Each structure stands twice: as C-alpha cells, then as structure tokens.
Image: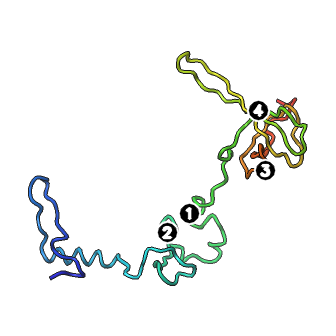
Amino acid sequence: RAVSGISARSFSAATDDSREKKKKLTQAEVAALAAVYDEDYDYDDDGGPLLPGGGGAGRRRSSNLSPIGEDFSKMTNEELADTSTIPGWDLIHCPPRKKVKGALVGKVVSDKMAKTVNVAVDRYRIVPKYRKRRKYTKKFMAHDEKEVCNLGDVVMIVPCQRISKNKHFMVREIIRAKGTL
C-alpha cells in the first residue's frame, strides 16, 4: 500500500557496488521516509512570490529567527533599540565600500565646459611578446555640478545615468588637487 502517494518502488537505496541491483526498502522504511517528506512539504504553496502580510498563495511559515539563526523574540525593547545587541546587525548593515563599482581615477585635462570636465584615465597592459607595460589613455567627460574641479586635479569618476551623448560619468571626489602632494 502506498503512503501519501509514495510507493515502495520510488524509494530505493543503492548498495556500495554500483553494478549490483538496487536494494528495495521495506514498507516500514518507506512509511518513515514518507512521514519525513510530508512534514516539510507545503501543499498550499504554489511557488509564487510571497505576499505582503503573509497571506494567500506562497505563504511561508514565519519565524522569529534572525538571518544567522538566533532567536530575537525574547529580546526586550531596550535590547532591540541598541543595534549592537541585535544578532547579525553588523553582517547586514555593513559600511559602504571605499571604491564604487565601475569607478575610475584620472586627471582633469579640460574644465572649459559648463558643469563638465574632461578626465584622462590611464590604464596599463602588459604586452606578452615583449613583456613590457604599455599605457592606454582614454578621455571621459564627467559631470561636475558645482564646478569645483580644476585643470590637473586627480579625481574619481563614477558611472551614472547618461546625461548627454558623450557624458555618462560624474565626479565623485577630488583625490588630489593640483599643487598638493
């Protein structure tokens, strides 16, 4: 007799030698395995997105466990107000990185346009045949809203939404102003 639609033929364990025939499980072992699979399976779950408030299809069981597995339901309001006592707070709320993804560092070669600077970014690549380093320079137009960049400044530019035909970077910070070490 099948338990919860699972037959004895669907559960079979392989022996150590893969060439031998698979060993059949007994009816008691099938029932035990079916009980384990049935308690984890949610028949109402259609695999869809979770709804706000936890209702409807795709509803998951709510738990009071933090992302790292500690229980925070028994914590007092004072402990929850202090971020140092909340388990896993440092893992989720980490400080931002120093260098933004896609950021480039270059030298300002022109500041004659309104709210725009031209930044030359130097990149180096090793030519394998000669084992020498070759310098490649590309100029990017970057948006400088407050017009604080001057000719010769070393700046960090970050990608942004395209502002014009040639301008899709903006100045994030002046790393070294001209004339300073």
Tell which tag, 4 or 2, sits nearer the viewer. 4
Q: Residue at x 89, y 43 (%)?
A: 148
Q: Residue at x 65, y 46 (%)?
A: 101
Tell which tag, 3 or 4, sits nearer the viewer. 3
Can you give x and y, in whole percent of width and height, for residue 17 in the image? 12, 52
Q: CA distance from mark 4 to mark 2?
A: 50 Å
Identify residue for label 3. 163
Q: Nearer the viewer, residue 124 or 86?
A: 124
67 in relation to 121, above or below:
below
CB within 8 Å, label 3 to label 1: no
Q: N-terminal of the two: label 3 or label 1?
A: 1
60 in relation to 99, above or below:
below
Q: CA distance from mark 3 to mark 1?
A: 39 Å
Q: N-terminal of the two: label 4 or label 2?
A: 2
Tell which tag, 2 or 3, sits nearer the viewer. 3
Identify residue for label 4. 120
Amino acid of disc 2: Glu
Amino acid of disc 4: Ala
Q: N-terminal of the two: label 2 or label 3?
A: 2
Q: Nearer the viewer, residue 97 or 116?
A: 116
Q: CA distance from mark 2 to mark 3?
A: 47 Å
Can you give x and y, in whole percent of width and height, for residue 11 in the image? 19, 69
Can you give x and y, in whole percent of width and height, for residue 114 in the image? 90, 44
Rendering quarter of residue 80 = bottom right
Q: CA distance from mark 1 to mark 4?
A: 42 Å
Identify residue for label 1. 88
SS at mark 3?
A: loop
CB within 8 Å, label 2 to label 1: yes
Rendering quarter of residue 136 = top right
**Quadrant (top left, top right, bottom left, bottom right) of the C terminus:** top right
Identify residue for label 2. 70
